[in-house]
Amino acid sequence: MGGFCGVVSKNDCVCDLFYGTDYHSHLGTHRGGLAVLKADGNFHRSIHNIQNTPFRSKFEHDLASFSGNVGIGVISDTDPQPLVMCSKLGTFALVTVGLISNIEELKDELFKNNYMQLQYSTTSGMVGPTEVVSALIATQPSIVEGLKYVQDRVKGSCSVLLVDSTGKFYASRDKWGRTPIILGKKDGSMIAVQESCALPNLGYDHVRDLGPGEVAEITPEGDTTLVEPGKKMAICSFLWVYYGYPASSYEGRNVEMTRYRCGSALAKRTPTEADAAAGIPDSGTSHALGYAHEAGMKFARPFVKYTPTWARSFMPQDQRQREHVASMKLIPVPGLIKDRRLVFCDDSIVRGTQLGKQAAKLYSLGCKETHMRIACPPLVYPCKFINFSRSKSEYDLITRRYIREREGENADLSKYTNPDNQEYKDMVEYIRKNLNLTTLAFQRIDDLVHAIGLPAEQLCTYCWSGKDYAETGDCYHCPCEDGECPCHSDKGEKA
């Protein structure tokens, strides 16, 4: 997926920028980059491949040569960033996060109108999403109008941090707010980040989250809204389920606390007799703690994760390499497995390959029963709004392979998203048998909405429901009758 950080300060910004960007390393392992505006109005920029070496290790030797009061950094899983561009609007540096689903259409339009015949300072021989965004900006009379134009034209999502050669620093959140931008402040400095966990250890206090489609100018003293936020938001629910960092909060809802509530909801909805609850590390651990507490059972760690040298398993391009990395990271503790009935919580099931292997390993070590509880509903629709998966085909999803086998390629998918339908139940039973699990249950969307604590219309649940309320204008109809449900009122934990 990727993440970014930007800092503007009355003093040198490099230290905060470096560590603030590093706090986004869990979001990607492809490339990292920094760009800092020097006193002479030029940018000092550095980009490194971080697939086999952490961001911090690659950039430590660059820091001595960096200095300036404003800069941007990025962990990118798409193109090399930051991009430094010369245009009619002057020179500016920018970073982007998101997924531009209509990028080919935009490229064709820009080339046709000769807008892509501009000078780029890149390390790539191809035109990537950040180049396209920079060209779109440059077609407009000003940078602010350009940032707004990007949000009007991009399908999918695109959040941007931009610094121009005069030192002005802009933050632009994607049109529907699918990814967050969070502002922090300390004496003489402001910071814009995607992960709020970057704030406290750098000494910043949380100021606010930018609204959907909002463009703000940020100075050491504060921020000014230049493009007002839209009224609709569709922030990605998977932030809380999986790829958000546990210490981070988005729209006032903390990730760790949400995962705990997800596990609790699973224990209430799908109880089972077992000796202990456990999580598939890392994100499953928080869900399992909630499950164990609600169910009144022990929490155990029959799998521990070895992380010092292994990248995130979904990041390598090659699927066989991803599977190998994933299997190498999880190390079993036989004494916590043999002759035990275990409930495992995990964030999601995509292909099911790794989960099947883990179940087989558990049985080989003497596990009596393996009960799996998944913290989100079945993934039926590949995400088309943000870039969080390497999947190339909808049939990478185990759910879609089952549906194709059962009904062919033109099936009514909505039948498989309603947990009360027989088609849904048959699909879950197929996955259970395929992965050789004792029992299997998925979170319901309404329980997930409860756990997050935002009104359902403000959350994107497309990959589970196939519905995008922001773009269609449809209304979510909560099946529960609980007046405390965030679907009915804006109540819920604020972290």
Image: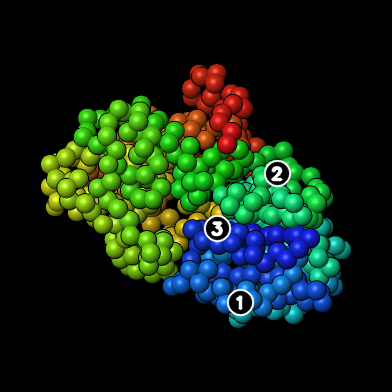
Q: CA distance from mark 2 to mark 3?
A: 18 Å
Q: Which residue is pictured at 66% across the width and 50% down the height?
A: 204
**In the visual, does 420 lie left or right of 272?**
right
Look at the numbered disc 1 and give the secondary structure of its residue: helix
Q: Which residue is pictured at 82% across the width and 77% down the height?
A: 40
> Is any atom of residue 381 visible in this view?
no
Look at the numbered disc 2 and give the secondary structure of its residue: strand
Figure quadrant of the C terminus:
top right
Residue underneath mark 1: 62
> Is any atom of residue 143 visible in this view?
yes
Q: Position of residue 117 (x, y in %)?
A: 75, 79
In the rendered view, tell whether residue 486 sits above or below residue 12. above
In this orientation, which residue lies closer to the viewer: 1 or 111? Answer: 1
Q: CA distance from mark 1 to mark 3?
A: 18 Å
Residue underneath mark 3: 23
In this orientation, which residue lies closer to the viewer: 242 or 193? Answer: 193
In the rendered view, tell whether residue 141 sits above or below residue 404. below
Q: Position of residue 44 (x, y in %)?
A: 70, 76
Label placed on residue 207:
2
Corner quadrant of residue 80: bottom right
Q: Of marks 2 and 3, which one's residue comes earlier in the chain?
A: 3
Q: Amino acid at mark 1?
A: Asp
**In the visual, does 107 lie left or right of 261?**
right
Q: Position of residue 161 (x, y in %)?
A: 70, 60
In the rendered view, tell whether residue 216 sits above or below residue 140. above
